[in-house]
Amino acid sequence: MTNFANRGKSLEDLIIYANKQYQSKGLALIQKISTPWTVIRRGKQIVSAFPAEKSTVDFIGVAGEKAIAFDAKQCHRKTLFPLENIEQHQIDFLGRWQEQGGTAFFIIEMTALGKIYRLELADVHMYWLKSLNDGRKSIPVKDFEKFREVRESGGIVLDYLDLMGR
């Protein structure tokens, strides 16, 4: 298997490319969700910009009859993934998405390992709840061994939906 984690493209670029491949094969329609920005101008010059509201998650779409929502995160740490990289409103949105019958997860690139993983919401939520109760504020890198590594499959550069059947 080819590892695409260190090819110089950002994780979101890889996901967008994979989404185009899913779409061209008629397997899924998944879109990047843009964050709305408020721009402050002084005449024609842009002085500042900030998010107008909290975004939900990075990607939303459908694959077959499954509604999909997920957020993508990159981590450059060698030993852990800090839970502070995830915001409460993302956990809340994905939880509500799942309650409505959708599939919710995170794609996390551990750049120091050169690997990309798919973590189901339930797995992340377990760590999240422990962190709120004075537990560890991160996911140890050794725990990533139990999560599904995302790779190229069936002509999809990053088959995070695993639709090509490995």
Image (spheres, rainbow, N blue to C red):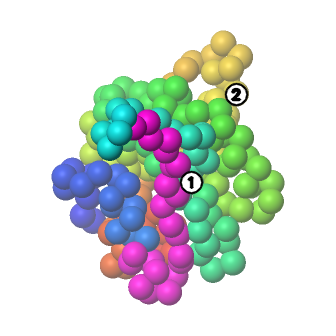
Measuring from the top left, give residue 115's x and y in whole percent.
33, 48
Label ID, residue 70: 1
**Whether residue 113 is situated above or below residue 159 in the rendered picture:** above
Residue 75: horizontal and vertical position, in percent? 37, 36
As drawn, is 11 to the left or to the right of 144? left
Tell me the crowding category of disc 2: few under 14, some 14 to 19, or many 20 or more residues within 10 angstroms, Cα based.
few
Which residue in the rendered view is the most extreme toward the front?
A: 43
Of 141 and 84, nearer the camera is 84
Judged left or right of residue 118, residue 92 is right
Residue identified by numbered label 2: 129
Magenta-highlighted residues: 20-41
Farthest right residue in view: 99
Kind of residue at disc 2: Leu
> What mark, if any, has residue 134 been given in the picture?
none
Give the structural element (helix, strand or loop) at label 2: helix
User: Is residue 32 a member of the stretch shown in magenta?
Assistant: yes
